[in-house]
Amino acid sequence: MSPGHVQKIEIPPATSAWCPYPTLYEIDTWIWLTDLSRKYAASLDLSSVPSAEWDAIADYGLDSVWLMGVWERSPGGIAIANQNKNLVEDFRRALPDFKPEDNVGSPYCVRRYVVDEHLGGLDGLATARRELAKRGMKLILDFVPNHVAPDHPWVTEHPEYFIHGTNEDARDASGSYIEIQGCSFACGRDPYFPAWPDVLQLNAFDPGLRRAVIETISCIAQQCDGIRCDMAMLLLNVIFESTWGGRAGPHPSTEYWVDVISAIKAGNPGFIFIAEAYWDMEWELQQHGFDFCYDKKLYDRLEHSNAENTRLHLCADLAYQAKLLRFIENHDEPRAAATFTPAKERAAAIITATLPGMKLFHEGQFEGRKIKLPVFLGRRPDEPIDDDLRGFYRKLLQAVNLKTFREGQWSLCDRSGWPDNSSFQNLLAWSWAHHDERYLIVINFSDSPAQAQVQVPWADANGGKWQLSDVLSGATYERDASEIRFHGLYVGLAPWNCHFFQCLRVGNN
């Protein structure tokens, strides 16, 4: 067993390379298998998921699946969580008939980077990866760099990997420090919130830890095609030092992520790193080697702000935007169906699905689930399926399941109005081009009607006519190409409505 206590597996044949702008589907693995076991009246794990279930995921045209929470859960973490009144209240809000055994442990309180036997163990994960690969999908797993469970083997084998306190800290700040075998360990935390009492803080400055992390991820890289790194910005030198000060020891000359990512990619060049990132650290993490970073700014603007502020966010350099991960829900955020009105959710989904970068969709999002489930829980309540919403997502994902949206050229479109009509500021517009294929997306991201002249950035757009076929609504329009090129395309949209145009030439002058 490696220092990271990770099972090793033979590397399967290489799959195709990642496309520039892939889609990702997040599944809460334990919950998903619980639901499938109920559905099929059998005890299922990753080795026995029926083919029809993998087919159903593949039918959406997704590029990859994130099996969230496959690693071994911590019995120590479960015991701590069940004594936390606030957590138990959260459990009961989400699951009114909650029982202590429903707490199966946080997937971010990792005891070992070994696939939990309840989920099928090493062989089960290997089976799931093969099933995904058969259908052209890659596999993403988790890595938690900031902390581990209090019963992780490193606690006794390598206590130097951790941030330590004094005996007085363990006595006087019991929520922030834990005493284990006479040694005081700091609980994991970020600098803006109280410590997490069920995990111990790793020392990102310790060179031995960095070597152990590289070996751990090297083993993980044999089991999947990439990792999502939890709270990745906490390991940046400047943030780690500001959080822990002198307890962390000497400031290293190199950055944690530069050391780790460069070492992993030297042996696994196609392996990707995804950063959960906040606090305006996305660009810096990209420079340290991350392939994609969370775009929480876009999510916040879609939820709380307006179209103009969203457009300003999309004015950023394309090289930066190409490495952002767009979403309107994930396991950390409220369910989209509970956050947005139905019309606004559809508009927000079209926005995220048609931007450059990686696009994340969350299991249950398509069906309209509204209950945000704490990640500790192993089952969830029944909720009605929104068939209309599921049909919308199926049509949307079919529309973007093209090379144009995975490899093409994205351009933000200017739009303008009139002296007595500024509603154009409520419209967002961009285009995609890939060889002769052209798409134009225009969204009214407001609760009022909006009109604008949309400038199409295609230098060869004049001459003849363009047929504009809306792939979502089925409507078709024919417009003069020179008029579009020199004056813009007139668009009028009702609140939250959208045009998703496939643009085809129908003749030349």
Image (tube, rainbow, N blue to C red):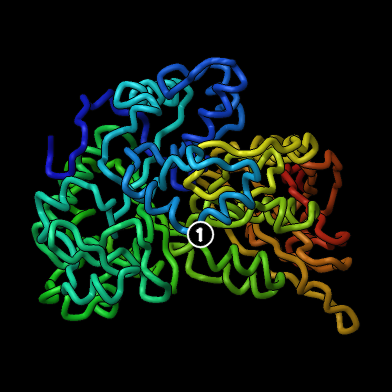
Residue at the bottom extreme, as displayed: 419
Asked whether residue 462 appears in the rendered view, the answer is no
Q: Is residue 169 above or below residue 17?
A: below
Residue 193 in the image, given as x and y percentages of width and height: 42, 73
Helix, strand or loop status at disc 1:
helix
Q: As drawn, is 246 to the left or to the right of 356?
A: left
Residue appearing at x 12%, y 73% in the figure: 253
Q: Is residue 329 above or below residue 192?
A: above
> Which residue is label 1 attached to?
85
Residue appearing at x 53%, y 23% in the figure: 54
Residue 439 in the image, given as x and y percentages of width and height: 67, 48
Name the residue type under label 1.
Lys
Q: Is residue 472 above or below residue 424?
A: above
Q: As drawn, is 333 to the left or to the right of 370?
A: left
Q: As drawn, is 37 to the left or to the right of 389?
A: left
Front residue of 258 and 480: 258
Residue appearing at x 60%, y 25% in the figure: 56
Asked whether residue 196 appears in the rendered view, the answer is yes
Residue appearing at x 83%, y 74% in the figure: 423
Near mark 1 (Cα within 10 A), the count class, few <14, some 14-19 or many ≥20, is few
Residue 471 in the image, given as x and y percentages of width and height: 76, 40
Front residue of 453 and 461: 453
Give the tally of numbered discs.
1
